[in-house]
Structures are given as structure tokens and as C-alpha cells.
Amino acid sequence: MALYLLFESASGYSLFNAYGLDEIGQNTEAVRNSVLDLTRFGKVVKLAAFHPFSSALDALNQCNAISEGLMTEELRNFLELNLPKVKDGKKAKFSLGVAEPKVGSQIFELTKIPCQSNEFVLELLRGVRLHFDRFIKDLKPSDLEKAQLGLGHSYSRAKVKFNVNRVDNMVIQAIFLLDTLDKDINSFSMRVREWYSWHFPELVKIINDNYLYAKIAKFVEDKSDLSENHIPELSELIGDEEKAKEIVEAAKASMDLSPIDLINVQQFAQRVINLSEYRKKLYEYLVTKMNDIAPNLASLIGEVVGARLMSHAGSLSNLAKCPSSTLQILGAEKALFRALKTQGNTPKYGLIFHSSFIGQASARNKGRIARYLANKCSIASRIDCFSEVNTSIFGQKLREQVEERLDFYDKGVAPRKNVDVMKVAIESSLNNATEKDADGQIDEASVKKSKKKKSKGENEDGESMAVDEPIQFVTDGEPETEKKKKKKKQKLEEQLKNDVLGESDGHEAEQNGTAKKKKKTSYDDLGNDAEAQNGTEGKKKKKKKSKSHDE
């Protein structure tokens, strides 16, 4: 019995024919020894057919189907085209060796091709994989490696449902950079204060904010040029007119500085201002990314604290895997191991100490509220990590629970149960989802209706004109179209010309007149039906008058 081998590579499907099995026998050790030597293995296995994939997307779809144990139409056509045909009612004189038993069973169910998957077939396929670039002439090893790398990346992304907008690495890098910028801006601001104090030492006592001090140092430059005319501009920078007057008064008696030193101080102050402005933009970026990646954690504990927890854990998925007890002391590992070593008290909180809830609690209840907050943070991080819907409703409800717990510790007010709060959160999230869908449908419907109204606007105008002026033709009460109107207008114009000029076509004019009368009578019948429904006598009189006038 002949043996064919199906090999799925990153570049396409290939079919190999195994010869000389009677000489080797189904001995796995013999095949294992002949795999490394291409001359020996090439005598046993030869390429029968090769079908390349059309694109990277096609390769990904075929790879997904094979991994799920499914046979695609492309694979079925490839096998039916290249394998020997089996007559109805007869057994196949060959078998197909596959690496995946699920794919083999699927192939046998749909095409009745006998398949096998055992150690002998797997060893043969291992040899095919090793020497695959030698069997196909135009295929280079570098091309095969590129195809394997690209398919591996795309397959991994599809399996883990990779989303570019939810990459937590951006948040980790942003919070690291934010902390570094805070340290650098503080040290640079102190350097500006010390440097500019040689020229204007009184300014340090008046202005406490580092960013504002750098802006004023950049604005003032040489204090000897400062006068009362600069008070409005200084008050705009500071936001306080009294402080502006103090600066002008203090500038009258101070030390002088050389112009070169002033230039260097101004340049350095400008660098500090630029760093401070970039820090503000980076903070805004961090807030937006946290609302995209972990909206519930951000609404519960804040964007900065949540980002620090994620960066310390390594990723959002690692944070979601942490139990609440680990999350509670995350960031206080040194204190924990020191306490374990000295058999002292373990720390009550780590990075979550920076949350506002810990500061609101009394000294007695700080440990309790830290434990409760860690529990809620662990729930929020798991919802953010594994939920497909991007919503912050759960984080808001968890925040309300923490606030209720604070009131319970301080005032004794009983908080709500967690089950009830989660039910309300789930209902509100479902309602929001349905409202969004309904809004989308309403918008689409309104657009369609507006288009229909625009297209029907002219028809409606035509109908109203037909009711007001019985001269025009109305057929069976149906709305008239523009083409029909134009034709009727042309007919009326021709009739008027014929009547005025008195042409010899009297017979045709009579026919047109009879047609007119018929149309009018049909219109009158419709008018009489409408009058019968309304049941008003006044309208009947008006109709009769109009009829007599038309006649």
C-alpha cells in the first residue's frame, strides 16, 4: 500500500510520496537514522505536489483551521486533485499520513481518504520538515524563515486577541517616565532657584512654586529693567496683583549679574519650563491610556496609583492574577521580608497607601480599609483584563462600596452587600450597551427617513397640487412621479396649441376631450367617496359648485 504524507508549512501545502517501505519496514529506528542524511532520506520520500498560499491572510486562515482540526476547501481540492482517485465500492490502495489525528479524521469523514498518524509517520514528517527547502527548488531558506516568523506572529496575535489600543506596556513606560520627570524637574528647579538667587534672592521668598518661579525668572531677566509698567504682565503670570507689586518693590535693591550669566540662567529656566509642560502632556496621555486599558481600576483608585500597580506587577494580566493579599503589600516587599526575618509586624499596605481612601481613614482603620481596597482593586483589575466591553461602571460602583465602608467605620452606617451592588452594575452596563445599540439604530433610521422624505418631497407636492387643481390627471389615487408630470404637461400644452391654432385634427382633439372627461369623472368619484366618509354637507356644496364651474 502506497503512503502519502501531508505536510503543512508556512508557505503552503505539500504532498510527499514515501517509497521503499518494504525494504525499510515500518521501523521507527531505521527512519530516525535515515532522516539526518538527505541522500538516504531522498530515496525514501519524494515531493508529489506543492500548493503555495496566496497571501499571509490565507496562510493564517489555513493555520487556524488546521489547529482546530478542520479541513478547508482549499486543502480538500488539493488532496482530491493530487491523490489517486478511488472508485465507488472499492478500497483505496493508499493511505495519507498526517501529523494531526483530528485533521485525519475530518479528511476521512468528508473525502473517505484513509489517514494514519503514528510514530512512523511523525518521523517521516520530521525529516520532511528538516529538508523541506531542498525538496522545493525555488524556495530559499531565508524566505521560509520569514514566512514562518510572520505566520507565527499573526497566529499568536489572533490566539491572544491582541488589541493595539489595550497595550499596557505604554502605561508602564509612561508612569516610569513620569516619575523620572518629577525627580528631574525638582532637581532642575532647585538649580534655577539657587542660580537666579545670586541676582534676585528676594524672589525665592515670594514665589514658592517651581514652575512659576522659572517662568518669572524667564520673564524678568534683568531686575534693573523691572518697573511698575510690568505689574499687569506679572499679575497675569502669577494670578495675584499684590505679589506682582512685591516683586517689583523687591527688585529695586538687589545684586547685579553679568549679561552672560543671565543668558545661561534664562536658557536653563526655559528648559525647566519645557520639561514641566511636557510633564503635563504626559500626564494627560497617561490618563487617556488608563481609561482605555483599565477604566475600572482608574475610576476606583486613580490613574497614577493604578498605573504604578500595573508597572510593579509587570502587566495588567499579572496584576489580575495577583490575590488581594499580594496586591495589598505590592511595593512593600523589603518591609515584608524584613518583618518575616525579624519576626516583627508585617506591613499593612504598599503602593495603595497613595490612594486617597487610606488618607481619609483614621489610624485605627487604615489596615482595614487597605485590605478592603486591595480586594476591590483585585476585582477591578480582573474585570478590566478579561472583559471585552470597555466600561467604568464597575469601578464606580466599587468606589461607592469603599466610601460606604469608610462611613461604616466612622459613623456605623451599614453598607450594601456586594451581590446587590454587582447586580446593579451589571444591569446598568447592559442598559448602556442597549442604549448605544438603540442610538445607532435610531441614527441609521433617521438618515434613511430623511433620504426618503427628500425623495418623496416632490411627490407629496405633486399630490397636493393635484387635489387643489382638478385640471391635472389623477390615476387611482396613486402618487405621481416627475416623469408622468412632464408628460401630462406636454399633453396639455399640445392640446392648448391645437385649440388655439384650430388645426384640422379634430378627431384627435375629441379623443383627448373624452379622455379628459373620463379622468375627471374618476376624480369626482374619489371626491364623492371622501365626502361620504366625512359626512359634511358644506363640503358637498363646494364640490358641486366646483363641478358646475368646471363644466
Image (spheres, helix red, strand yellow):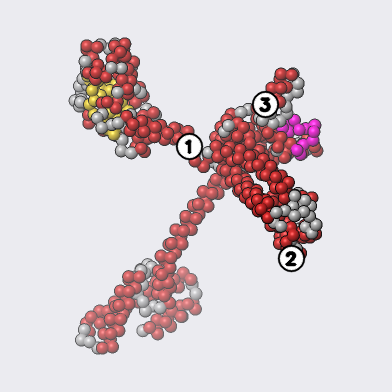
Q: Position of residue 361 (x, y in %)?
A: 77, 36
Amino acid on which the number 1 mark rests in the picture: Phe
SS category of the residue bearing label 2: helix
Q: Is residue 111 above or below residue 450?
A: above
What residue is shown with label 1?
162
State the SS at label 1: loop
Q: CA distance from mark 2 to mark 3?
A: 58 Å
Q: Please report the residue visible at 74 percent of the width from the left and 31 percent of the height from the top.
A: 368
Task: Check disc 3 and report its element: helix, strand or loop.
Answer: helix
Q: Which residue is mark 2?
A: 229
Q: Nearer the viewer, residue 543 or 338?
A: 338
Q: Is residue 290 left or right of residue 370?
A: left
Mark nearer the viewer, 1 or 2:
2
Q: Residues within 10 Å of mark 1 (few under 14, many from 20)?
A: few
In percent of width and height, residue 70 lies at 35, 30
Queried whether the magenta region covers residue 343, the answer comes back as: no
Sequence-wise first label, 1 or 2 = 1
Region in magenta: 359-371
Residue 27 circle label: none
Image side of residue 186 versus residue 30, left or right: right
Query: Residue 467, position in %: x, y?
Result: 42, 74
**Residue assigned mark 3:** 333
Left or right: 180 in relation to 535? right
